[in-house]
Image: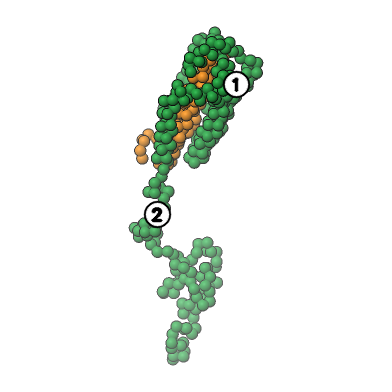
Amino acid sequence: MLHTAVVLAAASTTDHVGAGEAITFWILGPLALAGGLGMLFARNAVHSALFLVLTMLSLGVLYMVQQAPFLGFVQIIVYTGAIMMLFLFVLMMVGRDSSDSVVEVLRGQRLWAGVLGVGLAGLVIGIVARALTSVSSVGLNGPNSTNGGNVSQIGRSLFTDFLFPFELTSALLITAAVGAMVLAYTGRGGKGSKRTQREMMVARFRGEHDRPSPLPGPGVFATGNSVATPALLPDGSIAPESLSEIIESTPVDEYEHDLAEVANAEASPDAHALTGTEEARS
Amino acid sequence: MSPTYYLLLSALLFAIGTIGVLVRRNAIVVFMCIELMLNSVNLTLVTFSRINGSLNGQVMAFFVMVVAAAEVVVGLAIIMSIFRTRRSASVDDSNLLKY
């Protein structure tokens, strides 16, 4: 493979950047840079992700322009299609509003990080510009036009020269999938799991709630059994817990007569007594 | 114009990603900055593959993409499990790997 590449490279003439490619570069390069800067400066994490999508799309088109069509499509499908959507999913699960804290834990860290980053950019750009200005590019017209083109050639070298790394890749992917499952798995004893009825009963009697039993129901009498009717305690007074909070606007005096009747405050015939009223008894 | 401009662009993107990793506090955004750095290296590999007239650089960029995908999956799972225990995705809040 390497041998044929060298032969083909020798056979093909030097490639030059055409006007179309230059125009594409000067449109997409600034777009990619703007996406990177937007990702850096966006307060909202979702905006950062979308700016990064812009950068990755531009880079994918730049790959295609640079005679790497396979990588360009893989970039768009895998990076912007899969990885960035995974990012967005996790962002939505973690919470969109979990934005950056403004508090600086290390004093002056942002400033020094900016200075060092700009310094790194200057250094690398200086090196590249100094070392590679006079380099003439060979171009991929040779390898991309023989043996079935770009995709076939990449596949061929994947399964011949790079077979062992390729197999290692499968082990890596399996490990990543299993690791993600292990890390993201919440067992049954986790925070979100539901308690069984027995555990809830024990918790109730341990005093986690105000009272171990449910609240008393409303009163059911011959004159009324609506939810608004309060239940009566054995001494005839109203059980306050039986009054629903939702229907608290119901005036209690409406039931005064009924309450008095039930509490046997009025001299009325006692339905439960076998002997009849007091007058009848006397 | 020569293909060197691509290398300059990728150097700039790499520096932006470095600054982002150093400056941003949200763990997910830090991760995205790492992705940006990997992408800029991919652009470098593709450009060098073109300059040298060999497809080996593109194969290497392909491997970088595979490793980046695996890394993202594991890293996001770690961020989610940290978020589940600490209720925060900030890199300042996670000073312990357990609890």
Question: Is A62 left, or right, of B38 in this rendering?
Answer: right
Please name the color used to draw chain B. orange
Question: Is A205 left, or right, of A100 in this rendering?
Answer: left
Residue that protrudes farthest toward the top in the picture: A134
Q: Is mark 2 on a helix, strand or loop?
A: loop
x, y percent for residue A275: 43, 88
Q: Residue at x 52, y 11 (%)?
A: A132
- The amino acid type of the residue labelled 1 equals Val
Label 2 belongs to which residue? A195
x, y percent for residue A89: 51, 39
Q: Are marks 1 and 2 on the same chain?
A: yes
Please name the color used to draw chain A. green
Q: Earlier in the sequence, mark 1 or mark 2?
A: 1
Label 1 belongs to which residue? A65
Q: What element carries label 1?
A: helix
Residue that protrudes farthest toward the front in the picture: A147
Q: Can residue B16 be seen in this view?
A: no
- The amino acid type of the residue labelled 2 equals Arg
Disc 2 is attached to a residue of which chain?
A: A
Q: Which residue is drawn at 49% across and 73% down?
A: A220
Question: Is A153 left, or right, of A275 in this rendering?
Answer: right
Crowding around mark 1 (Cα neighbors within 10 Å: few <14, some 14 to 19, many 20+) is some
x, y percent for residue B13: 52, 22
Q: Residue at x 51, y 70 (%)?
A: A229
- Asked if A30 appears above or below B26 in the picture, the reply is above
x, y percent for residue A213: 40, 64
Q: Closer to the camera: disc 1 or disc 2?
A: 1
Q: Residue at x 57, y 22 (%)?
A: A149
In space, the residues marked 1 and 2 are separated at their CA atoms by 59 Å
| Quarter of the rendering occupied by the C terminus of chain A | bottom left
